[in-house]
Image (tube, rainbow, N blue to C red):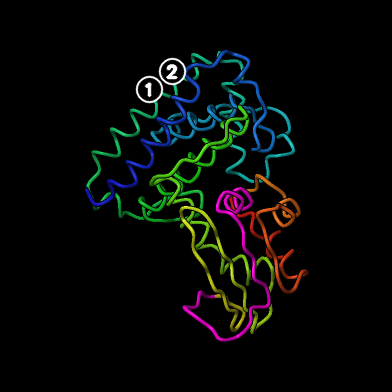
Amino acid sequence: MAYQWIVDALEQTWSSIERTMAPRDEDAYDLPTPCPGWSVRDVLSHLVGFEIMLRGGPLPEHEGPWPEHVKNPIGEFNEAFVEAYRSTPGSELLALFRTTTAASLTALRALSDEEWEKVGWSPEGDRPYYRFQETRVLDSWIHLQDIRDALLEPADDHGPGEEIVLNRFESALPYVLAKKAKAKDGTLVRVNLTGRLARSVLLSVEDGRAKALDTSHAVPDVELTTAVALFWRRAAGRISADAFLRASATDVRGDEVLALAFAEGLAIMI
């Protein structure tokens, strides 16, 4: 199967969530996570609910105003599932997570290459199905880290999930620089990431659009060096722009105003 690597990334990520939560008592499910407004239970509820929704399950009814952390229609149906499972005991919710994700993996393994490549609905607009499932990896992998952070047990999670997350966030950097940070034409920014998936990305703005360059002899307006783990946490909105820039593992050289605008625009998860 051409897209087996996506299935592998989902399986590894979901299995890690299950192994992390299996030995926990009920109190662990109520711990707050870095995901605004959500506990560990809420994160699991979201993951369960989204997979149920993808298989045609009904959206739970919601009454009253949405919480402050709900910002868009995607957030609304996510929150509807979170509220629906909020009183479910942790052990029952984890069992539901196990059976729901297993069913999803079985369904994904049965898809033809043509079905993987079919364009249809996704939270980002119409996209090929493989792109949508890459987004499921990104969402699930970040939530795995949310759970670990809530338990005060952060851990490296090297594998296909981490690679998909880093590649997706890297691909968004031109948009962040040109559209969110509103960098002017001629701006040159270099982002250096340190760690197992280390990379250096050089970005240039021309005609209001940014693109990656292989090389340049010019001195960048901003050179930002940071750890991979800080980069994805900021891109996922789990730490503030100020905390990201002031972290001991982050070094910023050049235009501080542009660096701040870039860091603020870097939070790109829906």
Q: How many marks?
A: 2
Q: Is residue 216 magenta?
A: yes
Say which residue appears at 52% left-offset and 37% top-offset. 155
Q: Inspect the image, locate mark 1, and give the three-letter code of the amino acid beneath it.
A: Thr
Q: Is residue 67 magenta?
A: no
Q: Secondary structure at mark 2?
A: helix
Residue 171: x, y in percent? 49, 63
Disc 1 to disc 2, how far (Cα)? 6 Å
Q: Inspect the image, locate mark 2, and give the three-letter code of the amino acid beneath it.
A: Ala
Q: Please state the extent of the stretch shown in magenta in the rendering.
A: 211-235
Q: Secondary structure at mark 1?
A: helix
Q: Residues within 10 Å of mark 2 (few under 14, many from 20)?
A: few
Q: Is residue 219 above or below residue 30?
A: below
Say which residue appears at 60% left-offset and 44% top-offset. 73
Q: Is residue 88 above or below residue 45?
A: above
228 or 120, which lies in front? 228
145 or 80, which lies in front? 145
Asked if residue 270 can be seen in this view, the reply is no
Say which residue appears at 54% left-offset and 73% top-offset. 202
Q: Are marks 1 and 2 in contact (CB under 8 Å)?
A: yes
The residue tagged 1 is 99
Asked if residue 112 can be seen in this view, the reply is yes
Residue 195: x, y in percent? 51, 54
Q: Is residue 190 left or right of residue 121?
A: right
Q: Residues within 10 Å of mark 1 (few under 14, many from 20)?
A: few
The residue tagged 2 is 95
36 or 238, which lies in front? 238
Which numbered disc covers residue 7?
none
Residue 88: x, y in percent? 56, 15
